Image (cartoon, helix red, strand yellow):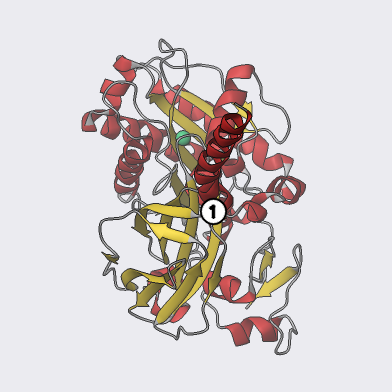
Amino acid sequence: MKHKQYQLILIIFTLLFLFITPALAGNKTFINNIRYWTAPDHTRIVFDVENLPQYKISPEGDQLHLIMELDDTASLLPHDQLKIGDGLIDTVRLKTKDGKTMGVVINLSKPAFPDIFTLNRFQQKPERLVIDIWRKAESLPAQKKKPAAAKEIGKRVVLIDPGHGGEDSGAIGCCLKLEEKWVVLSIAKRLQYILKNEPNIITYLTRSGDYYLSLRRRTELASQYKADLMISIHGNSNPVARMRGLAAYYLSPSAASDKAAELVAQQENAADLMGGVSLGQDKTLNAIIIDMLQSSSITESVKLGELTLKSFQGVPDLTIDKKLHSAPFAVLKSPSVPSILVEVAYLSNYQDERMLADPEFHRATAEKLAAAIKEYLAISAPPENLLVEGQAKEGVHYHIVQPGETVWRIANQYGVSLQQLRQANGLGHSNLVKTGQKLVIP
Ligand SMILES: [Zn+2]
């Protein structure tokens, strides 16, 4: 009997060991999916993984081959090659090495800069390894190189910001499964098209395709383009399915004006977790930007918000929330650029979602937004009185170094060479910059 008991225990232990071993063996992880998006200045490749692997860049790579090694990783994909062919990246190849390490070879069409980081599980998104491949400044299309080119006298600049994009779909419709990122891009493009007929208005889009732009980058563009105003376009979502209609918001650096506004701000601010920037980059966003915030831009934003709400009065079938709300939206934190965020309708409401699916509604919405923008510009102060922080009268442009930023990335962003940037800031041959350091952009 005793012997039998012993045998039984042995069998149980053996079985346990068999089941536990793979878990102990550890942190084996799997690649479940690879996706990519092409933006004008970079291409983003995202690996969906079971657990985040240890990774390193292999010294075996060269200018046209970025080689990475992922520890203890296997692929569950049917193919080991992904063809991109977008002019920057040719292919991504997976190659198992020594049975454990996964080699990732990114074949580049031209030399570029990698920026690699991980994103944690967030809502329905899994753990992700993100590889951003940045184009070198000299290979960018001409108009992308110097977005802050001298503003033409008498012209007003409108920056239109369609929310979300790429990895971050934004809200998903309750019934037709519309994705917010597409709806807002369509409205934004129509708005730009309408404003193109205005001889004194120049419009820019923060994004013109399906790719993600960090909230911080969107606010930076407002400064770079010397925008007179920025309008961020979104679609709303609420667990209460009957909630409908359009609402407008301006930035409040502290508390939201009400509970619902707080919820909307939380949802929209989560875009960076979804769509992805490395977390380190945005931790200090609030502290830095709020310091720079000027009360004059709040007054101007309120003016713009009220004109927008007024413009939408009387649109058939569209419920308007007549109160202008305030909430701490990260994307509205452009210092002294009057900015509002408009949630055009609810994707979580069936009637609203049907409206949002209709291109005619996109056009009508764009018309109303354009009318409000024109009215605001007609009554607001001329551009000289709305100088953007960091753009002093003599035209000097500054950049405050954010966590995780490198000299090449800043140079690339402003379309200047590394050498010019080093020279302008007395950096010698050093590439070292500190978070919070103020750099002169030559
Ligand atoms: Zn949104």
**x then y, percent, for residue 184:** 36, 38
- Residue at 45%, 29% in the rendered image: 343
Q: Name the residue beneath numbered marker 1.
A: 52
Do we see residue 53 in this rendering?
yes
- Residue at 56%, 36% in the rendered image: 7
Note whether ligand 1 is within 8 Å of mark 1.
no
Q: Quadrant of the C terminus?
A: bottom right
Residue type indicated by callout 1: Leu
Image-based side of 57 in relation to 422, left or right: left
Q: Nearer the viewer, residue 67 or 242?
A: 67
Q: Nearer the viewer, residue 330 or 21?
A: 21
Q: Residues within 10 Å of mark 1 (few under 14, many from 20)?
A: many
Callout 1: SS: loop
- Residue at 65%, 48% in the rendered image: 336
Q: Nearer the viewer, residue 69 or 372?
A: 69
Do we see residue 201 in this rendering?
no
